[in-house]
Amino acid sequence: MNLLENERVDDLQYEGLKLIQNKNGFCFGVDSVLLADFAKEIKRNSVIVDIGTGTGIIGLLLCKKTNLRKIYGVEIQKNVADMAKRSVQLNQLEDKFEIVNADICQIFDVLEPNSMDCVVTNPPYKKANTGIQNEDEIQMIARHEVKCTLEDVIQQASKLLKDKGEFYMVHRAERLVDIMCMLRKYRLEPKKVRFVHSKPNEKPNLILVKAVKFANPFLKIDKPLVIYDENGDETEEIRRIYGRQIETAT
């Protein structure tokens, strides 16, 4: 497969998956890997939409972690969508994973409303015109609510989902109140929350959220997910999520 300028192929070291990334663009982080693992409980034969698929990392992982029937990766940036499509081809997953180059706010020109079993998303975390503004357009769109807001993502997800369809999101912990208010506004009932901490005694920086369309109120708070232990080594759970062999004492 031909690579464009500044592109590389990364071995995800999980089920033989490989991913094309642009070293000058927005590369995936731990948040996408954690979301794919958090969402692995989706029902068998589910049809899924990944809103803001980017490189396609979440969709690729879900193709291996679940028994999904089909996943659509929606990406507004044409060059990023093209790169994700080539990663799908590289992994020979065209029968399961389709990249859709579209604006989420016009998604119903492509996908049917009330037709999806599940929506997953790792959306831009920062509100427009806040924080440090990255000059690179690709990274700006990935990090800031330039092309879509948190409300856009949740509203369109609700419209895409069937009754009792599932919604999975990773976001910054400080946006928790915004997330919960928006979920209920669009009839997605929060069902499970998990806070992600870099180290055991540090405040959480990420949050994983599951919601269900038209579900009854009941929220489960999972135990915290810790990335590094007190010594700065990856925790056993993180090594499991990444598919890394866990060393045992002999």
Image: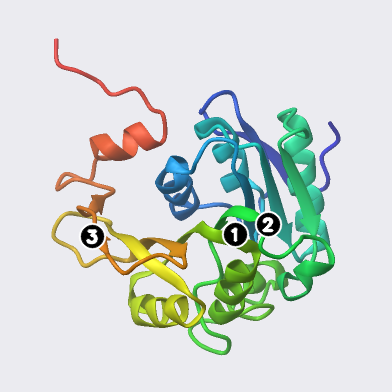
Would you name the residue on which mark 3 appears? 221
Q: Is residue 121 visible?
A: no
Q: Residue at x 71, y 70 (%)?
A: 104
Q: Is residue 136 above or below residue 224?
A: below
In front here: 23 or 202?
202
What amino acid type should be assigned to the residue bearing mark 3?
A: Ile
Looking at the rendered structure, the kind of residue marked 2 is Ser
Q: Taking 201 as reference, is 40 above or below it?
A: above
Eyeballing the image, is 182 above or below 19?
A: below
Location of residue 250 by image quarter? top left
**Residue that numbered label 1 is attached to:** 162
Occupied quadrant, residue 247: top left
Q: Residues within 10 Å of mark 1 (few under 14, many from 20)?
A: some
Q: Residue at x 57, y 47 (%)?
A: 58
Looking at the rendered structure, the kind of residue marked 1 is Lys
Labelled pair 2, 1 in contact (Cβ < 8 Å): yes
Mark 2 crowd level (few <14, some 14–19, many ≥20, 10 Å Cα):
some
Judged from the image, the secondary structure of the residue bearing numbered disc 3 is strand
Q: Which mark is residue 115?
A: 2
Q: How many marks?
A: 3
* Label 1 residue SS: strand
User: Looking at the image, can residue 7 be seen?
Assistant: yes
Q: In x, y percent, where is residue 50?
A: 62, 55
| Mark 3 Cα-neighbour bin, 10 Å: few <14, some 14–19, many ≥20 | few
Mark 3 vs mark 1, CA separation in Å: 25 Å
Q: Secondary structure at mark 2?
A: loop
* Image side of residue 22 versus residue 57, left or right: right
**Mark found first going from the N terminus, 2 or 3:** 2
In terms of depth relative to the viewer, which is nearer, 99 or 113? 113
